[in-house]
Image (cartoon, grey):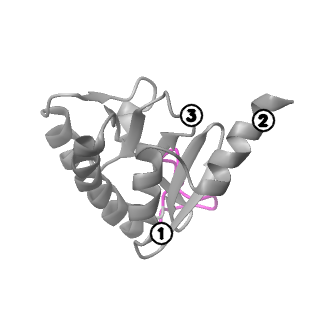
Amino acid sequence: MGRGRKTRRTLARGGTGPAHVLNQALGGWRGVRITPMFGRWGYFVGERLFACFPLREKDHDLWVRLAPADQARALREPGVRPHRRFARRGWVELDVLEPADVGRALRWLRRAHAAGGASGDDELGAPPAGGAPA
């Protein structure tokens, strides 16, 4: 009975640790919707998922979806690595462990947010149903 209580409290507070800081910052951005999903905070612009961060305080891997040029630039930075499954779709991973890491993460999140607002793709990179991309 106690396992779910901690998760519910985390959700009610808007996250803990670095997740709380990210949620506060991203919550103020135009068009951003933050939704808990599959053990992660999902960050959406419109219907497009552009980033996600773990709900659990002991996990720290931020996933960010970038445009191809930004992905290449991000991968040249230390600590940024291709996403283990979705690297070909522009996803990268970086660890957000302490407050100093949040600033670097927000820089990449701004780029992902800007790219997400300009695209009609869904969260996995496929064009919308019914034909050509919007």
Rendered position, 42 above or below 32: above
Residue type at mark 3 is Arg
SS at circle 2:
helix
Q: Are marks 3 and 2 in contact (CB under 8 Å)?
A: no
In the rendered structure, the answer to whether residue 87 lies left or right of residue 128 reads left
Mark 3 packing: few (<14 Cα in 10 Å), some, or many (20+)? some
Q: Is residue 125 magenta?
A: yes
SS at circle 1:
loop
Mark 1 packing: few (<14 Cα in 10 Å), some, or many (20+)? few
Q: Quadrant of residue 115?
A: bottom left
How far is the residue under mark 3 from the one under mark 1? 35 Å
Pinpoint residue 20: horizontal percent, then vertical percent.
Answer: 47, 52
How far is the residue under mark 3 from the one under mark 2? 12 Å
Q: Which disc number belongs to residue 134? A: 1
Tally of numbered discs: 3
In the rendered structure, the answer to whether residue 65 lies left or right of residue 40 reads left
Q: Earlier in the sequence, mark 3 or mark 2?
A: 2
How far is the residue under mark 2 from the one under mark 1? 40 Å
Q: Which residue is mark 3?
A: 56
Name the foreground residue: 121 vs 112.
112
Pinpoint residue 102: horizontal percent, then vertical percent.
Answer: 29, 47
Q: Is residue 34 magenta?
A: no
Q: Earlier in the sequence, mark 2 or mark 1?
A: 2
Residue type at mark 2 is Gly
Q: Quadrant of the N terminus?
A: top right
User: What are the residue bounds of the magenta stretch?
Assistant: 121-134
Q: Which residue is mark 2?
A: 4
Give the residue furthest to the right: 1
Pinpoint residue 26: horizontal percent, then vertical percent.
Answer: 41, 63
Name the foreground residue: 34 vs 2.
2
Give the residue furthest to the top: 84
